[in-house]
Image: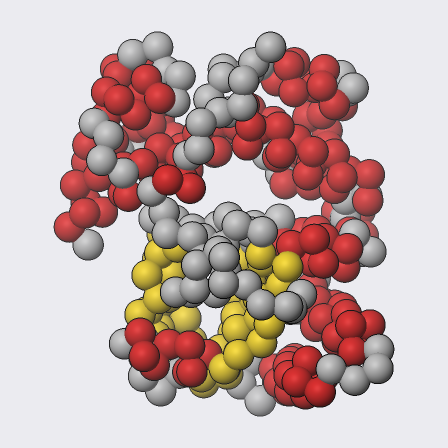
Amino acid sequence: MIKDPDPSYEDIVPRFIRYGESLDERGDWFVNIEHLAERCRDQGWRIESHAHPGFGQLVFMRSGSGTYVLEDEQKDLMSPCVVTIPKNTVHGFHYNDDSDGWVLTIDNFYLEQIVSRLPDFAWLWSESRLFSLKPKSDAAADLVSQLRNLDREIERRGVGHTLASEMILTSMFIRLVRTKERAVDQLASVADNKTLDQLKELIERHFRHEWKVKDYADVLGLSVGKLRSVTMRTTGKSPIKLVHDRIITEAKRQLIFGEMTIEQIASWLGMSSPAYFTRFFKKETGQSPSHFRTANLEN
């Protein structure tokens, strides 16, 4: 029996429900909405890298600009724009002081119920996505209206407020996926998305255990070919690429946030030797682990 992996990013990356709030401070809510400026002003407009276990977030920047840090990558933000942040995604924001908008924090159990209703919703939340909107566009105006309605609905907590909030969130998600034109034959089925979710859970548990693609396929009750077809349809990546991506993500987190040596990280990730880890990391990222660590610690 293969044991579950030891805690990974959870030991080295700050974890919050909402930024600055510990995991035991949660109130009685399934979706929380707050103004971006109210959350960020007291933080000096800097939200340092962190993660939200069990919660997804949607950030709508109505005004201002800044940068978005996703794992080790940095992206420019220019309003109006939307960022979706799935649970456990390491992220941060550096805003200019003229920025405002809304931050939604959504319980992942509740979020998954909404996502299950349309295949494109799974695409929307399969990874962190940035949607740049045109100023004064219908999409931007609709999202502002929907967020204001959601804020009022949650504040009043009237009869049927849970269902009403769910309808507003569903409408928002539809508006976002419609900003990206996707051909019908590119849409994954509900079954494909469910398989992908199950695969991701397995990868999360076993990426350090040197599982082969066949191991994952066997647990899922699929052939290797069928599993590859599913992941290519849903992500454009092969199963082994998804595993490698998760290993690299964890390696980067340890190099940026952790204190283990490169040799210790290699061993902890189940690599046969530090040299093999260095070759693997360089092949996947284009730079050595030591260079990556130095460059990110200097930033």
Count of numbered circles on the image:
0
Between 79 and 293, the one nearer to me in the picture: 293
The type of colouring in the image is: secondary structure
Classify residue 16 as left or right of residue 46: right
Q: Quadrant of residue 258?
A: top left
Where residue 167 appears, as percent x and y from the top left, is 80, 73
* Residue for point 19% across, 32% down: 290
* Residue for point 68% across, 26% down: 228
* Residue for point 60% across, 72% down: 32
Residue 70 shows in this picture: no
Where residue 3 appears, as percent x and y from the top left, is 54, 17
Between 156 and 145, the one nearer to me in the picture: 156
Between 210 and 111, the one nearer to me in the picture: 111
Quadrant of the frame with the C terminus = bottom left
Classify residue 69 as left or right of residue 112: left
* Residue for point 77% across, 20% down: 222
Q: Quadrant of residue 94?
A: bottom left
Q: Is residue 297 above or below residue 293?
A: below
Q: Is residue 208 above or below residue 25?
A: above
Classify residue 153 as left or right of residue 236: right
Where residue 262 appears, as percent x and y from the top left, is 23, 26
Residue 136 shows in this picture: yes
Q: Is residue 120 above or below residue 19?
A: above
Where residue 19 appears, as percent x and y from the top left, is 42, 65
Quadrant of the frame with the N terminus = top right
